[in-house]
Amino acid sequence: MSKLQQQPARGHQGSHRTQAVYLHIPFCTNKCFYCDFNSYVLKDQPVMDYLVALDREMELTVAINPPGQIKSIFVGGGTPTVLKPNEMEYFLKSIRKHFPDWADDIEFSMEANPGTTDLEKLTVMKEGGVNRLSFGVQAFQNDLLSGIGRIHNTDDVYRSLENARKAGFDNMSIDLMFGLPNQTVEMLDESITKALALDLPHYSIYSLKVEENTLFHTMYQKNQLPLPHEDDELQMYLLLMSRMKEAGYEQYEISNFAKPGLHSRHNMTYWLNEDYYGLGAGAHGYVGRQRHMNIKGVNAYVDGVEQGLPRLDVNPISKEEAMEDFLMVGLRVMKGISRTHFEEQFEEQLDEIFAKPLHKMVSAGLLEVTEDGYCLSEQGILFGNDVFGEFIGSITS
């Protein structure tokens, strides 16, 4: 699951009903060395009990906050495609039962790992309404893949994509990573070449972050993690931006590239600071300017649903926090933030509320003024975290 799918965006209050759904399947065949997501190795897990509990959480959720017409559904993990065909069928029927009103052009994405997607399972997914697949490929060098704990090899990637096309999928995305241990600029260049040869509509390309509670963090602390030099990592990012642009892909967000009109609509929900349901163990959700996080453990989540909504944490979000988040997440998108959109959400003037940090970032050459707001400059893209950091606490502290 990508970082942004895990991070809160503090939804806003509005008269319209929620139109986006995130569902979490926390099972994996194994744990990757860099992964700090809420995921558990599949062996001996009560999968069907979990899916029944998830069905119940959906039922409770829509009873309290009835949905609008659903425009996007995203199933992340874990690895949702470790579900067996019969489990997958049950799960997809649950979604359709509780969220029956789908937009004609709904985007229904599911994360998939190469090596866990045979034709039978993909056919069940297609028949259940899934119409977009996001494959976690990460690299096209088998040594690098085994070095980060992935179970698939490059042959699995080609076979999975071939199976997906046979099952009728044409809207597909792959994730790549850079800044991996022992990765060189040349290796990333080769991965991009092989990825582009697949001629897919969408690519997500993330830099490795060494997170706590991962094997990589332990190795890093012992000085046993051979990460690329910072200069090489910068070269990797510059390379991928120029290569994707040359190939006709629009960089519509810091880590995401798409053919015109084929960006991830679900992720835009987060970046536009809009409401979405978050369902499943450890899932985050934002509805009516209230943020929640669910109980993380599989058995604890199943038990929790028996008592009601399986909440670990619920936070009402102040208008000021929501405004800060609007800038923080919105500036990730290349076209930037809109004064009009800000005013619609908050009935306040963007330039008045954030006059000081906006002026500072424009003066530093990291933000540019657009027709209706602000966007990252070319330099700002490289120092995005510094820019976002300027707005955290700028009106709440």
Image (cartoon, helix red, strand yellow):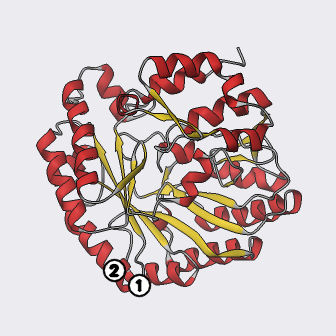
Q: In which quarter of the image is residue 67?
A: bottom right
Residue type highlighted by circle 1: Ala
User: Measured along the vertical axis of the image, is residue 48 above or below residue 240?
Assistant: below
**Residue at 24% of width from left, 20% of height from top?**
223
In terms of secondary structure, where does tag 2 sit?
Answer: helix
Residue 212 is left or right of residue 356, and the answer is left
Q: Which residue position holds label 1?
A: 167
Image position, residue 104 (x, y; %): 64, 78
Q: Which residue position holds label 2?
A: 163
Q: Can residue 347 be seen in this view?
A: yes
Image position, residue 109 (x, y; %): 52, 66
* CA neighbours of label 1 inside 10 A, class few (<14), some (14 to 19), many (20+): some
User: Measured along the vertical axis of the image, is residue 4 above or below residue 214?
Assistant: below
Q: Quadrant of residue 147?
A: top left
* CA neighbours of label 2 inside 10 A, class few (<14), some (14 to 19), many (20+): some
**Residue at 22% of width from left, 50% of height from top?**
243
The C terminus - image quarter = top right
Cβ atoms under marks 2 and 1 closer than 8 Å? yes
Considering every residue shown, the one lying at the far left of the view is 186
Residue type highlighted by circle 2: Asn
User: Measured along the vertical axis of the image, is residue 374 above or below residue 220?
Assistant: below
Q: Is residue 38 visible?
A: no
Image position, residue 202 (x, y; %): 38, 61
User: Measured along the vertical axis of the image, is residue 336 above or below residue 140?
Assistant: above
